[in-house]
Image (cartoon, rainbow, N blue to C red):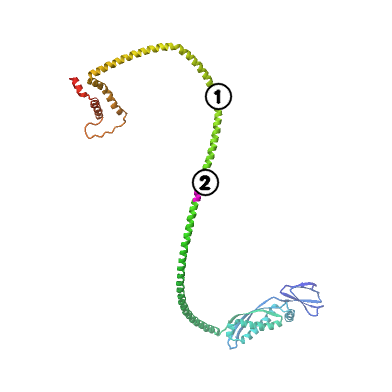
């Protein structure tokens, strides 16, 4: 063996014996220095062992054979030095299988002992009590061997005689009976409670409906008052808004007018400046040249006037002579026309009605022309006739009838019967 440090895992323990040790040194999950030859090192497993403990056909206190299967977890305690020392005395040098066999036999014996002290019903109904009894009894013995029982659980209970099945059937029948009774009682209680609940529900409903009606009435009254107040405030707000809007609109219009006034003033100012500019431009381009031209023309006109005056003075004598000649001619012509008119008047006076007839005859063609003149300006004529002539002949007839009415008009004005006069002249 090589001397030096020796280590082991957390599920192992080192047992060092020999020189320098009055009793073995125990190291659980660590390391130790070992002298070769004079010291010896051995390992002891500390891992957890799971054991299936089956006790077949064990008679209970009532003499009923049953088979029980339990599951236990055990391990060698490495934290307690006394228990570890006991485990070294019992299992040092043995394999893990041998340790499991020893623990299994011990637990199986205690399990059988507890099964013989209890009835089938106790084991079947109170498994926790059975597991606790096995755990407590087995732990005391195994602890002396350095083994700790971590847990014990009853896994299965069975029998070959049908005892457990009979218990189950009886219990099942009892449970079914109790279930039927309970169901009937429950239905009865449920029916009663439903009736009571329905009665309470209807009473509560009537009370609730009454309260709802009262609440609705109060709500409607309050709502009407609130609506009145809201509508009043709303109307006031709308009127105030309309008034404010009108004021704002008026102010906007006034501001727009003010803006227009300012713009107009600016335009007037610009126009005045433009007028002044144009006046200056006119002064520079037109007025001053015009004044110069006017002065020049005035001088020319004055010279021309002087020339005309001189020429007029020269021609005045000739004009005077010519005027006298024209005056003599006009005087002679007037005297001739006056004489002619006097003779015509004497003739009219002498002939009287004959003269009027003569004048009328001379005027008839002119009258006919004036009567027909408007027809020459007409583009379209629509004529409606109830009989007789139509078309152009009708127009001619209308013109002739108008002309033929002239003797009647002359007679009504002058008292002269033109037709009679014409007849007498013809005779």
Main SS of residues in magenta: helix
Image quarter (top left, top right, bottom left or bottom right) of the C terminus: top left
Quarter residue 381 falls in: top left
Q: Residue at x 55, y 85 (%)?
A: 163
In the image, is residue 218 above or below residue 75? above
| Marking on residue 288 | 1
Alpha carbon of mark 2 to alpha carbon of mark 1: how far?
51 Å
Name the spot of residue 141 as percent of width and height, x first.
69, 83
Most extreme residue toward the left is: 427
Question: Which region shows up in magenta?
Answer: 243-247
| Residue 243 position in % (x across, y down) | 49, 50
Q: Relative to 77, is 219 above or below? A: above
In the image: residue 249, left or right of residue 147: left
* In magenta stretch: residue 249: no
* Residue wearing tag 2: 251
User: What's the residue at 34%, 14% (across, down)?
Assistant: 331
Q: Is residue 245 magenta?
A: yes
Position of residue 204 in the picture relative to residue 363 (left or right):
right
User: Tag 1: Cα neighbours inside 10 Å, few (<14), some, or many (≥20)?
Assistant: few
């Amino acid at each position: 063996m090589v001397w030096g440090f020796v280590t082991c895992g957390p599920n192992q323990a080192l047992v060092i014996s020999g020189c320098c040790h009055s009793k073995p040194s125990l190291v659980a999950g660590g390391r130790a220095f070992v002298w070769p030859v004079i010291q010896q090192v051995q390992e002891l497993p500390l891992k957890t062992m799971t054991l299936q403990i089956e006790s077949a056909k064990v008679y209970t206190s009532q003499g009923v054979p049953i088979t029980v299967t339990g599951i236990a977890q055990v391990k060698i305690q490495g934290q307690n030095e006394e228990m570890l020392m006991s485990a070294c005395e019992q299992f040092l040098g043995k394999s893990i299988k041998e340790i499991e066999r020893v623990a299994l036999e011990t637990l199986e014996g205690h399990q059988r002992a507890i099964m013989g002290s209890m009835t089938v019903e106790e084991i079947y109904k109170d498994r926790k009590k059975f597991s606790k009894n096995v755990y407590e009894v087995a732990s005391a013995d195994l602890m002396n061997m350095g083994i700790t029982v971590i847990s014990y659980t009853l896994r299965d209970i069975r029998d070959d005689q049908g005892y457990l099945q009979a218990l189950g059937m009886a219990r099942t029948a009892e449970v079914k009976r109790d279930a039927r009774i309970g169901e009937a009682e429950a239905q009865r209680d449920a029916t009663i409670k439903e009736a009571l609940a329905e009665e309470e529900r209807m009473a509560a409903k009537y009370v609730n409906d009454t309260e709802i009606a009262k609440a609705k009435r109060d709500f409607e009254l309050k709502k009407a008052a609130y609506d009145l107040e809201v509508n009043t405030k709303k109307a006031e707000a709308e009127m105030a808004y309309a008034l404010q809007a009108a004021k704002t609109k008026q102010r906007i219009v006034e501001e727009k007018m003010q803006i227009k006034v300012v713009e107009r003033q600016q335009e007037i100012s610009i126009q005045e400046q433009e007028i002044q500019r144009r006046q200056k431009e006119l002064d520079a381009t037109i007025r001053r040249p015009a004044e110069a031209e006017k002065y020049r023309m005035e001088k020319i006109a004055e010279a021309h006037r002087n020339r005309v005056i001189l020429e007029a003075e020269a021609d005045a004598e000739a004009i005077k002579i010519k005027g006298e000649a024209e005056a003599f001619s006009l005087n002679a012509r007037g005297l001739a026309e006056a004489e002619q008119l006097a003779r015509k008047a004497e003739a009219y006076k002498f002939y009287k009605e004959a003269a009027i007839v003569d004048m009328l005859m001379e005027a008839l063609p002119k009258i006919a022309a004036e009567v027909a003149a408007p027809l020459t300006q007409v583009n379209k004529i629509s004529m409606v006739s109830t009989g007789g002539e139509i078309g152009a002949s009708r127009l001619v007839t209308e013109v002739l009838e108008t002309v033929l009415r002239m003797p009647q008009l002359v007679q009504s004005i002058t008292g002269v019967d033109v037709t009679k006069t014409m007849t007498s002249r013809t005779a």
